[in-house]
Image: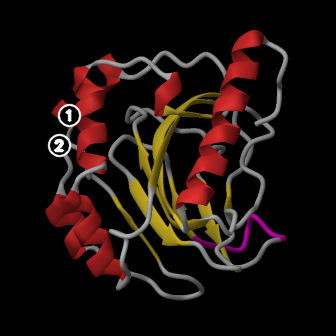
Amino acid sequence: MLNYATLQKVPLNTVPFPHFAASDVLDGAALSRIAMDFPAIEHPGVFPLSELNYGDAFAELIGEIEGERLEAVLEEKFGVTLSDKPLMITVRGRCHRRDGRIHTDSKDKFLTCLLYLNDSSWDNEGGRLRLLRNGADLESVISEIPPLGGNFVAFQRTDNSWHGHLPFEGPRRYVMFNWLVSDLALAKNLGRHKLSAALKKLGVYHGY
């Protein structure tokens, strides 16, 4: 499903932190299949795979994300080793207006990737990921990535890997996958996401 040639040829930017963005990483046919099999998600926030039900095409995409070929492409691109780090995959289906506040990601995360799965009609200024020069100004933009289906962004977590987006509320689909620094970090983060998912389903938790 994934266009590995596109991922290989796009250049890595190193200032102010290592990152790259690519478009058309999924073609129209793949996006259509994935859209049909995308998990039904009624609440904002990110959900671990274990809390979701989805069809074969989405499962095929997850299989590629978990595969050695993508890992090898990213290792070469960033000049790092990922094979000794655990992978965490989470999925978002909806966005809340409180989402998108500027942050760097936690120190548990080593490398973050986002693969967007929305259709091509996205025309809202909100919800467009912005990689930023600092942690105080959403207008200090290095790169802006609209969440159109097939758009892909990856960055190495650093103390200045600032990112966020303008407010948006409504459907906003992506798969996020993070290589974490340790198995302990994986267990901690998955536990937090599972608890959050369970509370959301009960209607007693509204944090995102």
Residue 184: x, y in percent? Answer: 60, 58
Question: Is residue 141 on the magenta stretch?
Answer: yes
Of the two numbered discs 1 and 2 on the same chain, state the one appearing first in sequence: 2
Whether residue 141 can be seen here: yes
Q: Horizontal placement of 2 versus 128: left or right?
A: left
Question: Is residue 150 on the magenta stretch?
Answer: no
Magenta: main secondary structure equals: loop
User: Which circle marks residue 30 in the picture?
Assistant: 1
Q: Residue at 35% of width from left, 85% of height from top?
A: 79
Residue 196 or residue 174, whichever sits in front? 196
Residue 152 versus residue 169 in the image, above or below: below
Q: Tell me which segment is drawn in magenta.
A: 136-142
> How many other residues sit within 10 Å of disc 2, few (<14), some (14-19) or many (≥20)?
some
**What is the secondary structure assignment of the residue under circle 1?**
helix
Picture quarter with the C terminus: top right
Residue 157: x, y in percent? Answer: 58, 72
Residue 129 versus residue 96 in the image, above or below: below
**What is the secondary structure assignment of the residue under circle 2?**
loop
Residue 11: x, y in percent? Answer: 32, 80
Q: Horizontal placement of 152 versus 100: left or right?
A: left
Label 1 is placed on what type of residue?
Ala
Q: Name the residue furthest top.
A: 202
Residues at marks 1 and 2, CA–CA distance in whole angstroms = 6 Å
Label 2 is placed on what type of residue?
Met
Which residue is denoted by mark 2 in the rendering? 1
Residue 15 versus residue 133 in the image, above or below: below
Residue 190: x, y in percent? Answer: 60, 42
